[in-house]
C-alpha cells in the first residue's frame, strides 16, 4: 500500500489539484462507493458514536474500532448501502478503507525565522472543508526520509484586508536527500480559527438551510528554496483561502 499511496499522491501533485474525490454508482445494488478524500474522526451521541467527517458530510462509522475522536485519516474508500441503513436519521458507512494521517497544531510566533526548519518543498497541494473541524491537510513533496513540519502564524506581521499569512516549514531528519518523497500531513486549526476568526452565516453546500460559522482568510506560504541562508517562499494559493468551522462544534 505504501508504494500505491506514493504513486497516487504524485499524480495529485502533477495534476496541480488538491485531491480527487468521486462517488461511483455500484452495479451490486442501490449503493455508492466514495473514494479518495481526507476526513476527521468525530464522536457524536446523536449518531451512535464514531463518525467520519468528510466533504460529503458527517457519516456514522461504527465499524472503526482503531480510530479516535480528533484523528485525521485518509479515506481510500467507503460504501453507503442505501438498502441496508440501520436508521433513516443519518447515513452509516461500511467497507471503510483508510490510513491514519499524522498531524499537529498550528503555532503562533512573532517571527518566521527558520531555525532548524531548513528543508525546502518541491511541491505542495492542500485541501480544506467545513466538515474537517478546522483541520487543514497538505500533500507535500520534498527530499528527505521523515522530516518534521510546522505551520506558523506570524503575529507580528501586519494583515492586509484581514488576511492572515501562514508559513509552512520543514525540519530535515537526515542528510540523505537524493530521493523525492511525497506524504500527507494535517494541522489542527480549530482553536486558532475560533480565537482569531469572524462570524458569518451562509447557506451550506446547495441546501436551503443556513448555518453559523467562524472563519479566517489566509494566504498559505511554503519554503520553496534557500539561497545564501535565506528562505524563498512561494504562495500556494492565488487568492486567500477561507477556512471555516461550524460554531455548533465548539
Image: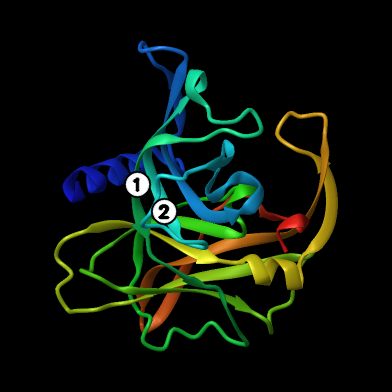
Q: Is residue 18 above or below residue 193?
A: above
Residue 209 tag number: none
Residue contact between numbered discs 2 and 1, judged by CB atoms under 8 Å: yes
Q: Is residue 250 above or below residue 238?
A: below
* Percent position of residue 206, x then y: 73, 29
Q: Residue at x 38, y 54 (%)?
A: 65
Label 1 CA crowd tier, 10 Å (few <14, some 14–19, many 20+): some
Is residue 38 visible in the rendered structure shown here? yes
Q: Residue at x 21, y 59 (%)?
A: 180
Is 104 situated left or right of 4 in this image? right
Residue marked by disc 2: 73
* Percent position of residue 238, x then y: 60, 49
**Between residues 175 and 36, which one lies in front from this camera angle?**
36
Answer with the quarter of the image where residue 29 lies.
top left
- Tag 2, which secondary structure? strand
Q: Residue at x 55, y 73 (%)?
A: 106
**Between residues 20 and 213, which one lies in front from this camera angle?**
213
**Between residues 67 and 171, which one lies in front from this camera angle?**
67
Is 39 situated left or right of 240 in this image? left
Which of marks 1 and 2 precedes in the sequence?
Answer: 2
Residue marked by disc 1: 98
Answer with the quarter of the image where residue 229 lies.
bottom left
Is residue 161 visible in the rendered structure shown here? no
- Could you tell me how far apart the alpha carbons at marks 2 and 1 are, in whole angstroms? 7 Å
Q: Is residue 76 above or below residue 152?
A: above
Amino acid at each position: 500500500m505504501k508504494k500505491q499511496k506514493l504513486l497516487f499522491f504524485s499524480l495529485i501533485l502533477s495534476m496541480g489539484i488538491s485531491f480527487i474525490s468521486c462517488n461511483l454508482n455500484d452495479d451490486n445494488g442501490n449503493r455508492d462507493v466514495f473514494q479518495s478524500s481526507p476526513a476527521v474522526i468525530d464522536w457524536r451521541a446523536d449518531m451512535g458514536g464514531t463518525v467520519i467527517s468528510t466533504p460529503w458530510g458527517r457519516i456514522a462509522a461504527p465499524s472503526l474500532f482503531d480510530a479516535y475522536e480528533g484523528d485525521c485519516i485518509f479515506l481510500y474508500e467507503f460504501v453507503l448501502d442505501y438498502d441496508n441503513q440501520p436508521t433513516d436519521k443519518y447515513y452509516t458507512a461500511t467497507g471503510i478503507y483508510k490510513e491514519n494521517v499524522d498531524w499537529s497544531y498550528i503555532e503562533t510566533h512573532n517571527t518566521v525565522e527558520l531555525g532548524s526548519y531548513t528543508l525546502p518543498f518541491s511541491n505542495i497541494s492542500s485541501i480544506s472543508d467545513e466538515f474537517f473541524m478546522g483541520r487543514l491537510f497538505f500533500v507535500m513533496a520534498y527530499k528527505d526520509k521523515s522530516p518534521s513540519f510546522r505551520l506558523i502564524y506570524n503575529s507580528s506581521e501586519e494583515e492586509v484586508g484581514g488576511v492572515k499569512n501562514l508559513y509552512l516549514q520543514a525540519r530535515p531528519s537526515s542528510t540523505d536527500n537524493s530521493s523525492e518523497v511525497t506524504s500527507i500531513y494535517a494541522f489542527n486549526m480549530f482553536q486558532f480559527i475560533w480565537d482569531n476568526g469572524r462570524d458569518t452565516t451562509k447557506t451550506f453546500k446547495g441546501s436551503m438551510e443556513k448555518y453559523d460559522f467562524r472563519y479566517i482568510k489566509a494566504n498559505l506560504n511554503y519554503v520553496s528554496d534557500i539561497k545564501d541562508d535565506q528562505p524563498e517562499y512561494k504562495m500556494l494559493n492565488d487568492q486567500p483561502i477561507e477556512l471555516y468551522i461550524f460554531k455548533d462544534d465548539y
